[in-house]
Image (spheres, rainbow, N blue to C red):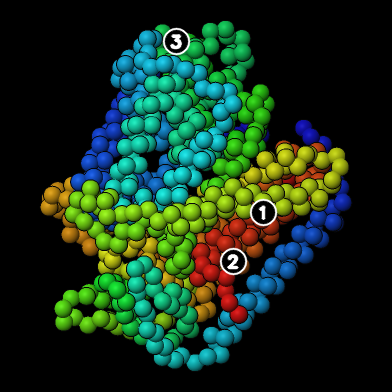
């Protein structure tokens, strides 16, 4: 049965907006302005993390928006409006909006060996190693913003062609790509046959009024959302009007081989899934868990008070190497060794139940089944995001009235006290989300199995350990958010 | 369309249901034990001296039974701290100023079962937002309810997805 799809570009006004060369600038620029405000706030605003607009917007509002709305509903919608590549891309193209064939920079090709998301995995782990400091010190968030929005992207835009930064390095892009695969929106070609017969390939090479895909995607081969940044250049480029932006129900991004089998799945995406599913637990333990030692080691700088200006705040802090090594060790070991090992054991069990001979290889089962962690960990992150938003959201209302600590009360909200919202029903909302994740995951496991095995019996047997693993993960997440967060005693 | 041959139908069903029964049995026995303990004990007064330091509470997990009257005496071991209990919306503060006491008390009846996070409410340093602990009011119905629902959902949806809607 054909799945429901509706091409949003059939709406004339939307098509007209998307076809405009100013489209990308218009959607990025407001975010860019917000970024400038946040950057200033990080350095001159309140030195106290939970009163600083940059810390609050980046780590509460933006994170919650990403995990609760933007990614699950819009896929890479954030990438469409993201200010991170803005400066670099404007410089590279030497224009804000126009099509310019003579670009600035060295225009190097990205190494073929790095055509994967391993760098994004490591970039996210680096950020996570410092998460305790980033979420509590405005100066740290400020330095991170300077690095991730100004220095590093600009450097990569001037060294390499297209959006190498977004596709291969950005720490945020990796997990958005992973979770975008379950979003009810997709950019696809309307009729692949039309593309295959058309020699121009303007969508990849660029056309008179559009750049070739900045994300190195070939629209005729798009069958997953993972690396389409929804920049809409291909819509402008296609002379055959063969690109659709579909609203869809369901989707098989998690089960299919990339580019209709022209590319093979590697271990980079499974490891992204391991990283995200493990960090959903570690972050939750740091933010609300009952283990003080974990919070202590996550606090890898030794500052215990706040000074009035950010230079003093940086100077009074020193790195504690023991904590860095311990917390870094926890983050890197649990995501790159522990979780993959547990998953490998369950995959072995799965292979044993399916039958050692005449089944898929261990590696293929390991890779394919790892995509069950996408809905499972996404809902764990949603439970996390809704908690931090409802508990700490009112801090934002107060901080937005005085973003630079000048004593302003711009919106009359400066004196709103910290008021946690819906704490009585919050566990039930989180429980519902986690439960939904389990059900969604069971369906995903079924679909992965169905795509991998030729007999129903074998598929069912192979699924069993994965279903049990999903249940155990669900128990763990429930224990963190609805339980004491520790193994019950007695 | 792939022709799915039926294999050893009974085997996987037996394995699956055995695992589900085992998990359910552990869950039921734990639930019965917790509910038994809390049902068997009459409401009592519980006094807890809760020490606060940058950035932890001691004890960090407090366990009481539903109906208990809980008196929490918050004592600071270093700088000013606060106490806020989610779900009950109770608050106390110890602000270390000259002449001010180094403790504050909050008293309430633990009438809502479940597990509730308590956290510091006075900016006590950079890691203040992470200074939390847990109050377990037995029986922690939402937690065990969630676990039980997970097992039920798993069983139902495995049947729905894997057998009925294959």
Chain for mark 1? A
Compared to A148, does A446 lie above or below?
below
Residue mark closest to the camera, 3 vs 1: 1
- Residue A433 appears in the figure: no
Quadrant location of the C terminus of chain A? bottom right
Compared to A193, does B61 lie above or below?
below
Whichever of callouts 3 and 1 sits on the residue coming sooner in the sequence is: 3
Quadrant location of the N terminus of chain A? top right
Q: Position of residue B10 (x, y in %)?
A: 85, 56
Whole-angstrom CA distance, mark 3 to mark 1, is 48 Å
Q: Kindly state the secondary structure of the residue where label 1 is placed.
A: helix
Compared to A5, does A209 lie above or below?
above
Label disc, if present, on residue A141 of the rendered structure:
none
**Residue occupying image coordinates x 27% and y 64%:** B123
Whole-angstrom CA distance, mark 2 to mark 1, is 21 Å
**Residue occupying image coordinates x 64% and y 34%:** A266
Same chain for the residues under marks 3 and 1 in the image: yes
Left or right of A6 in this view: A414: left
Left or right of B30 in this view: A100: left
**Residue occupying image coordinates x 58% and y 23%:** A112
Residue mark closest to the camera, 2 vs 1: 1
- Residue B24 appears in the figure: yes
Which residue is denoted by mark 2 in the rendering?
Answer: B147
Label disc, if present, on residue A342 of the rendered structure:
1
Whole-angstrom CA distance, mark 3 to mark 2, is 56 Å
Q: Residues within 10 Å of mark 2 (few under 14, many from 20)?
A: many
The reply to whether callout 3 and callout 1 are in contact (CB within 8 Å) is no
Q: Residues within 10 Å of mark 1 (few under 14, many from 20)?
A: few
Label disc, if present, on residue A207 of the rendered structure:
3
Q: How many marks?
A: 3
**Residue occupying image coordinates x 69% and y 57%:** A468
């Amino acid at each position: 049965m054909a799945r429901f799809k509706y091409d949003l570009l059939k709406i004339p006004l939307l098509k007209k907006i998307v076809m405009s060369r100013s489209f990308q600038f218009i959607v990025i620029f407001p975010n860019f302005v917000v970024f400038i405000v946040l950057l200033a706030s990080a350095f001159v605003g309140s030195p106290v993390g939970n009163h600083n607009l940059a810390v609050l917007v980046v780590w509460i509002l933006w994170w919650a928006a990403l995990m609760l709305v933007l990614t699950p509903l819009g896929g890479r919608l954030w990438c469409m409006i993201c200010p991170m590549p803005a400066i670099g891309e404007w410089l590279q193209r030497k224009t804000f909006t126009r099509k310019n064939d003579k670009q600035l920079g060295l225009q190097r090709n990205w190494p073929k060996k790095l055509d994967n998301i391993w760098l994004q995995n490591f970039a996210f782990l680096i950020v996570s190693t410092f998460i305790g400091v980033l979420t509590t010190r405005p100066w740290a968030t400020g330095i991170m913003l300077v690095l991730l929005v100004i220095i590093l992207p600009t450097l990569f835009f001037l060294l390499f062609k297209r959006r190498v930064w977004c596709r291969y390095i950005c720490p945020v892009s990796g997990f958005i790509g992973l979770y975008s695969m379950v979003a009810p929106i997709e950019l696809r070609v309307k009729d692949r046959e039309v593309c295959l017969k058309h020699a121009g390939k303007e969508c990849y090479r660029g056309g008179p009024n559009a750049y070739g895909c900045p994300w190195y995607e070939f629209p005729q081969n798009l069958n997953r959302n993972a690396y389409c940044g929804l920049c809409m250049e291909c819509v402008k480029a296609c002379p055959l009007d063969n690109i659709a932006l579909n609203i869809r129900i369901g989707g098989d991004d998690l089960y299919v081989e990339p580019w209709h089998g022209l590319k093979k799945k590697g271990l980079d995406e499974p490891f992204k899934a391991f990283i995200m599913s493990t960090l959903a637990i570690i972050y939750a333990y740091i933010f609300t868990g009952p283990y003080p030692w974990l919070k202590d080691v996550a606090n890898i700088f030794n500052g215990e008070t706040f000074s009035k200006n950010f230079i003093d705040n940086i100077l009074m802090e020193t790195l504690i190497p023991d904590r860095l090594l311990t917390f870094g060790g926890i983050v890197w070991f649990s995501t790159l060794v522990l979780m993959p090992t547990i998953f490998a054991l369950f995959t072995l069990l799965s292979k044993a139940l399916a039958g050692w001979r005449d089944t898929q290889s261990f590696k293929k089962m390991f890779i394919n089944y790892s995509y069950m962690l996408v809905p499972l960990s996404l809902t764990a992150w949603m439970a996390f995001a809704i908690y931090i938003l409802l508990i700490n959201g009112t801090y934002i209302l107060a901080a937005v009235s005085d973003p630079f600590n000048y004593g302003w009360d711009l919106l009359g909200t400066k004196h709103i006290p910290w008021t946690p919202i819906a704490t009585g029903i919050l566990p039930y909302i989180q429980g519902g989300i986690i439960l939904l994740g389990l059900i969604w995951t069971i369906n995903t496991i079924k679909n992965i199995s169905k795509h991998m095995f030729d007999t129903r019996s074998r598929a069912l047997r192979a699924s069993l350990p994965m279903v049990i693993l999903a249940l155990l993960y669900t128990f763990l997440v429930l224990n963190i958010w609805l339980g004491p967060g520790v193994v019950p005693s007695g | 369309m792939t022709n799915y041959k039926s294999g050893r139908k009974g085997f996987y069903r037996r394995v699956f249901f055995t695992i589900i029964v085992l998990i359910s049995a552990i869950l039921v026995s734990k639930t019965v034990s917790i509910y038994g303990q809390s049902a068997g004990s009459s409401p009592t007064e519980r006094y807890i001296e809760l020490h606060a330091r940058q950035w932890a509470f001691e004890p960090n997990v407090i366990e009481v039974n539903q109906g208990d009257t809980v008196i929490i005496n918050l004592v600071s071991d270093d700088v000013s701290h606060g106490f806020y209990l989610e779900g009950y919306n109770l608050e106390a503060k110890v602000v270390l100023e000259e002449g001010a006491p180094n403790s504050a008390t909050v008293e309430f009846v633990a009438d809502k079962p479940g597990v509730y996070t308590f956290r510091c409410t006075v900016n006590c340093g950079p890691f203040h937002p992470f200074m939390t602990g847990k109050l377990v009011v037995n029986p922690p119905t939402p937690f065990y309810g969630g676990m039980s629902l997970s097992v039920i959902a798993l069983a139902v949806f495995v049947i729905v997805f894997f057998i009925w809607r294959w």
